[in-house]
Amino acid sequence: MTQKDYTVEGRQFRTGTDYARALRDKRTIDELRSKTNMGNPAALEKLKSELEEGRYPFYTLLGEDFKEEVEEALRRLERPSKKGKHGKKGGKAGPVKPEGSRNSGKAAARRKEDSRPGRGASGRTPGSAKLDAIVQEELKRQEKRRKLTILACSIVAAGCLGYFGVYSWQNYRTGSNYEKLSDMKGSKPVVENVAPAKPLYTLDKEQEEKEVLDEYKNLLIKYKKLIGWLTFDDKTIGGESGFPVMQTVDNEYYLRHNMDQESDKNGTIFMDKDCDVLKPSTNFIVYGHHMKSGKMFGKLDLYEDQEYCEKHPYIKFDTIYEKGTFEVMYVFRSRVYNEEEIVFKYYQFIDANTEQEFNSYMEEMASMSLYDTGVTAQYGDQLLTLSTCDYQEKNGRFVVVAKKIKE
């Protein structure tokens, strides 16, 4: 393919955009030439002043070439007059040749050649020196920008490496801690018949007589906010140990802290503050981060695939008082809505006071479900809802709802 020739006024331009700008500059220059008497010093002085003031904007080096042309024309007009004034004969200056003469054409050709890169210092005009200064200044600015860019990139890279190091350490620490907790969970209580660490009353202050399961008594000595343990049929989610589940009065706390109250981007799996394991609530809602590393609920969206759900339909969730196995019933996407929006908000479904209310909730979730599992629930059944972030929309959520079954 033949390369296009982008040449204007002896200058070659690399791109179509620069070529178009050069043509626009040439039209401006031609117009100035046509309306200016290039043989009149006063007219040239006026034009030179207007050019220096930037009255005529130029977008390429053709503008600098034209300024040099005007300056050269002025110098030619001044030479004869100075010779006539200071010369030996003291005569007047001779007639000035018009711009369009043969000699002026040669001078213009020399001027354009002098303005191009690669000429020697002796062939430079004052305008060329000015142009060189502009180019050098621009090169200095570019070099400064380059150094600043390299510095900024280095700082960002160091920050990223630091973040990655902290993130990797927190991932390792979380996995290691969960393995240790899993071992503690199965160990014999340090003190026989230790009193349960949880108060024996529901959120409604109703008295309950429930004993903490033996496997959680050791853990509760250290982790008083522990409320249960979550494990999956497929160990891809949660690994062999599964997840300890915490509960506190602040639903934001365990988004940024681990079980030891240390700052941790992984957070901790936790139950909604309004759920009650003693009463118990109709629905246990459990939250966890959707970590790109796969930690926490990072792989909960495997249940998006119906075939995966059919292979791994069961989830175990033990409260500290009672064991439980749940079968997946609904899988859907939702989001966190504004308070004034009148719409089904799954995260507000904790208790159903009537059968009609329960059935209404079931119909809402069934209509949102990505597929039909064939599993249904009746009023009085215990539900488990697992919720994590979903990045398909702003404030999106991925949700798995399961029903407790009798083993």
Image (tube, rainbow, N blue to C red):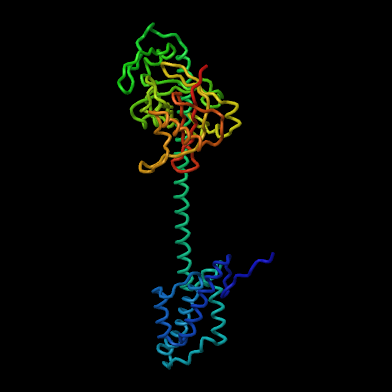
Q: Residue 39's spot in the image, x, y percent? A: 47, 87
Query: Would you place residue 251 above or below residue 125 in this image?
Result: above
Q: Across the whole image, how many numbered discs are drawn on residues?
A: 0
Which residue is the extreme one toward the front? 356
Residue at the spot 42% in from the left edge and 76% down from the top edge: 51
Q: Residue furthest top?
A: 192
- Of the pair 114 and 193, the residue shown nearer to us: 193
Name, please, the residue furthest toward the left. Answer: 205
Residue lying at the far right of the rendered structure: 1
> In the picture, residue 92 is in which quadrant?
bottom left
From the viewer's perspective, tell me whether residue 3 is left or right of residue 165. Answer: right
Q: Position of residue 40 (x, y in %)?
A: 44, 87
* Horizontal side, residue 310 vs residue 67: left or right: right
Q: Quadrant of the N terminus?
A: bottom right
Asked if residue 310 lies left or right of residue 161, the reply is right
Percent across and percent down for residue 14 are: 58, 65
Question: Residue 260: x, y in percent?
Answer: 38, 23
State the residue at coordinates (51%, 88%).
98
Q: Is residue 174 above or below residue 209?
A: below
Q: Nearer the viewer, residue 28 or 261?
A: 261
Report which quarter residue 118 is drawn in: bottom right
Of residues 63 and 313, the one drawn nearer to the viewer in this rendering:
313
In the rendered view, tell whether residue 308 sits above or below residue 31. above
The residue under the point 38% across, 28% down is 353
Res. 288 image quadrant? top left
